[in-house]
Amino acid sequence: MTPQQYLLLKDLNSYAKQNHNKCWCVPWDEGQFLHLIITMTKPKYILEIGTSIGFSTIWLASAANEYGGMVKTIEINEERAGQAQINF
């Protein structure tokens, strides 16, 4: 994970805590756990259903990037999907 990704995740985590009614994000520890699981299992493709603002997606993509994996993610809410694209 790059320092920029780490700082972005810290910012998104703070935002999610303050705006829990606008976005649904996994807790920080679960993001770290997702990163660890992906790093250990090295799946070629990852499908995330429910992007929200992209917090968990960044954890997943950071791990997948280390070995060439790919993350596909979908979000039904257009506002959250737009925010996720900005965050990516």
Image (tube, rainbow, N blue to C red):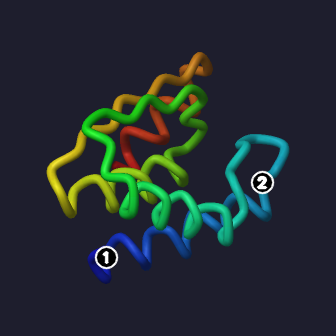
Where in the figure is residue 88, as x and y percent of width and height? 34, 49
Q: Secondary structure at mark 2?
A: loop
Q: Residue furthest top?
A: 76
Residue visible at 60% across and 37% down? Answer: 52
Q: Residue at x 69, y 54 (%)?
A: 26
Q: CA distance from mark 1 to mark 2?
A: 22 Å
Decide which of tag 1 and tag 2 comes sooner along the chain: 1
Say what amino acid the circle numbered 2 marks.
Asn
Relative depth, front residue between 42 and 51 = 42
Question: To which residue does mark 2 refer?
Answer: 19
Q: Position of residue 11 (x, y in %)?
A: 55, 71
Q: Residues within 10 Å of mark 2 (few under 14, many from 20)?
A: few
- Give the residue type that dot 1 points to: Gln
Q: Crowding near pointer 1: few (<14 within 10 Å), some, many (20+)?
A: few
Q: Observer-nearest residue: 65 or 2?
A: 65
Q: Quadrant of the N terminus?
A: bottom left
Q: Residue at x 50, y 68 (%)?
A: 9
Q: Which tag is nearer the camera, tag 1 or tag 2?
A: 1
Which residue of the protein is positioned furthest toward the left in this rendering? 68
Position of residue 26 relative to residue 76, above or below, is: below
Residue positioned most to the right? 21
Above or below for 66 versus 25? below
Q: Which residue is mark 1?
A: 4
Q: Residue at x 35, y 70 (%)?
A: 5
In-front residue for pair 28/85:
28
Marks 1/2 in contact by CB < 8 Å: the verdict is no
State the image coordinates of residue 19 (x, y, percent, origin top left).
Answer: 78, 54
